[in-house]
Image (tube, grey):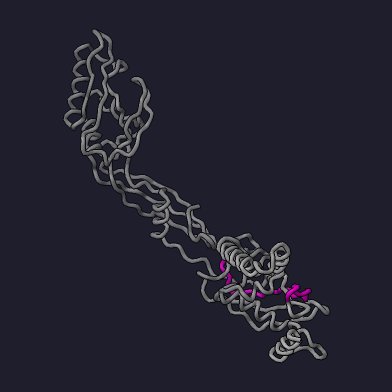
Amino acid sequence: MKRAILLAVVCALAGCSKGTTNRVEEPNIENAVTEYDRGLTDGTFNGFLAHDQSFQNTLLLAHAGIPDAAWPANMEQLRASRRATIQQERDTVAFGQSQSACYLIIRQGGHISPPRISQVNDGSWQVNFSVSYDNPASSPVVLTTSGKTRRLRSANVTVMFLRAAADKDSLTKTKIVAAPNCTADENSFATFAVPPLDMQAAIHLSQQGGNLPSQYVASINSITGVSSDQNWQNWQQFLAAAAILKASLEQHGWTVSGFQPQSMYYYDIHGAIAPPSGTQQWIVGSFVMNGWGGGNGYRVVLLDHSNATATAFNVQDDTATATIAVHFEGCTPFCALWKDMHGLPFDLGRYVFADWNAWHDPALASLDNVNSIVVQNYAWDAFRGWHLA
C-alpha cells in the first residue's frame, strides 16, 4: 500500500506514461542530449557521466559485486576517478583525425550550437552539432590530417545515442546513453594559428634548456710539471723552466708540492697543485687526466658570464631556426692565470692547461674576444608550445 502511494506521488510530480501506475515517464532524447552537452561544458561531468555508455557499463559491472548499502560511496569513488582520468587525457591526448573520445573535443569554454537530432531507428539517434571556442589557451587539442596538433577554434561533431535497459533500481524501464566516441568532420576543422616566436623568446628558450653556454670553461691538471718531451738545450735550462712554472703558479696563489728533479738528466719534474682559497665558486667539475699517473683535474671557469645575440632567425609556421652568437666576459682568477701562462717561455702553460686546441688558438690567448656560435632549432605543438627541437 505504501509503495503504491509513493509511486502515485512520483507519477504526480514527474509524470507517468498513459496507463502506467508504477513507473515514471521514460527519458527522452532531447533532455539526454542537453544533459550530456552541459556535463561536458560546465566542468562537473555529471550529465556526461549519466549518459556515457562506457561509464554506465563500468557502473553496471561494479555494482554487481558490491552490496546495495555500500554502493553510493563506491559509485562516487568511480565518478571521481573517471573525472580525474578525463582531465588528465584532456591535457595529454589530442582528438584524433576522425574518431576519439567526445570529452576531448567538447570541454569547458565551448559553445555548442542547437543539436540536430535524427532518429536512425526506434532505439537510436544521430546527433549533430557544432562546437566553437574563443580562447586558444583552453580549447581542445586536435590532430590534423597532416599529423600536427593544433588548438581547435570550431568543428562539426556527430555523436550516436541509443536507448538501453535501465539499471535494476531505476524507476524507468530504459535509459539513453551516448556512444563513447564522437565523429568530427575533418573538413570542418578551424584551428587557431600557431602563436609567433620572436628572436628574444627563442634565445630565452635556448638559455632555459641549457643549450647556450653561460660561462667559458677550461681544464687544469691537478698534477703538472716539466717533461722531457721538450727539446731542452741543457740540464740548467730544464731546471730553470721548472722553477719558472712553479713560481708562476705560486704567484697566483696555487699550492705546489713536489717539483724536485728525480735525478741528473732524468727530464721529468712534476708535482701536485691545488687552487688558491676563495676560488671554489669558479671550480665547476673535474675531468680524468692523462699522464703523470692519471687522477682527476679541475674544470674551472675562465669567463663567468655571457651575452647572446641572434645573428640569423627564421620562422616557418611551427618550426624555427636561430643562429646565436654567444660572447663571453668576466675574467676570473683562472682567466688571469691563463693569460699569464701564455706569456711564459717554452710554452710552459701547456703543462698546466689540458685543453690543447683552445690553448694553442691564438685568438684565445688573451681571452679578450671569446665567442661561440650555436645553431638552434625550435618546434611548436599544441601541448608544449614552442620548445627546443
Q: Residue at x 73, y 82 (%)?
A: 27
Q: Is residue 27 left or right of residue 279?
A: right
Which quarter of the image is occupied by the N terminus? bottom right
Q: Residue 367: horizontal and vertical position, in percent? A: 27, 40
For the record, the magenta segment spans: 150-169
Q: Quadrant of residue 216?
A: top left
- Above/below status of 311 relative to 189: above
289 or 146, nearer to the observer: 289
Asked if residue 75 lies left or right of residue 339, the reply is: right
Q: Report x, y in % for residue 48.
A: 64, 73
x and y percentages locating residue 303 in the rendered image: 28, 43
Quick one: 66 or 339, which is closer to the camera? 66
Q: Position of residue 382 (x, y in %)?
A: 54, 63
Q: Which residue is nearer to you in this view: 317 or 256?
A: 256
Residue 62 occupies which quadrant of the picture? bottom right
Q: Residue at x 26, y 11 (%)?
A: 262
